């Protein structure tokens, strides 16, 4: 009903799209996010959420376009950049995805959580162990908390580097 009351409102479309997304209604949600983005072309969240929904629908080119538009509008927000990197990796475009991961980390070089998220993603979602190790090392150079070390130890175990894993897990 909110759309009927104010059809020109991007805010109403945004809220309804979020509701539809929550219920996994990606087709409807993507349509509403895209409509909202035509009404307010400067809001990156509309493009970002549209991209996420389009990705779920396997509409790869449209998802890419919306992720790129998101980053054009807000190129200093690591969250957008990391999610686009993950999307690219899900399309087996690992080199380009890795470029976006590096860009995200360079925006906040002291934010170990970004590196940790990327390291775990590459390890668990794609078994890209060598690339994952680079991010773990970067993360550990900033913060060597126990659970980060343990997570890295698990990666070393998966890489069949059992002695290294055992040493690291003893310390953490």
Image (cartoon, rainbow, N blue to C red):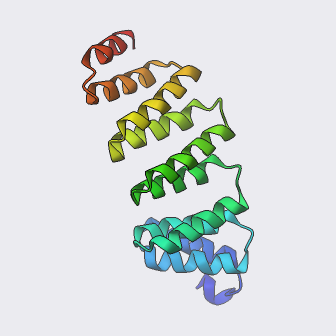
Place residue 167 in its image quadrant. top left
Relative depth, front residue between 131 and 4: 131
Give the vertical position of 28 relative to 153 (above or below).
below
- Residue 9 shows in the view: yes
For the point 68% across and 80% down, the residue is 38
Residue 6 x, y percent position in the rendering: 69, 86
Front position in the image: 20 or 42: 42
Q: Residue at x 39, y 56 (%)?
A: 92
Q: Nearer the viewer, residue 120 or 94?
A: 94
Residue 9 rendering spot, x and y as whole percentages: 70, 80
Q: Give the side of residue 32 with respect to residue 120, left or right.
A: right
Q: Is residue 20 visible?
A: no
Q: Residue furthest front?
A: 95
Q: Residue at x 43, y 53 (%)?
A: 89
- Residue at image point 32% right, 15% down: 164
Percent x, y of residue 57: 40, 73
17 or 42: nearer the viewer = 42
Q: Quadrant of residue 67?
A: bottom right
All told, the count of numbered labels is 0
């Amino acid at each position: 009903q909110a759309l009927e009351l104010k059809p020109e409102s991007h805010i109403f479309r945004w809220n309804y799209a979020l509701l539809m997304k929550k219920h996994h209604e990606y087709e409807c949600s993507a349509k509403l996010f895209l409509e909202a983005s035509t009404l307010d072309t400067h809001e990156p969240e509309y493009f970002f959420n549209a991209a996420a929904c389009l990705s779920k629908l396997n509409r790869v080119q449209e998802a890419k376009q919306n992720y790129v538009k998101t980053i054009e509008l807000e190129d200093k927000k690591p969250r957008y950049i990391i999610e686009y990197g993950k999307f690219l990796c899900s399309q087996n475009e690992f080199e380009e995805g890795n470029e976006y991961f590096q860009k995200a980390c360079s925006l906040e070089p002291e934010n170990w959580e970004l590196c940790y998220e990327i390291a775990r993603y590459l390890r668990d979602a794609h078994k890209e162990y060598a690339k994952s190790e680079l991010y773990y090392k970067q993360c550990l150079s900033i913060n060597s908390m126990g659970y980060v070390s343990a997570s890295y130890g698990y990666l070393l175990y998966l890489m069949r580097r059992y002695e290294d894993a055992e040493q690291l897990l003893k310390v953490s």
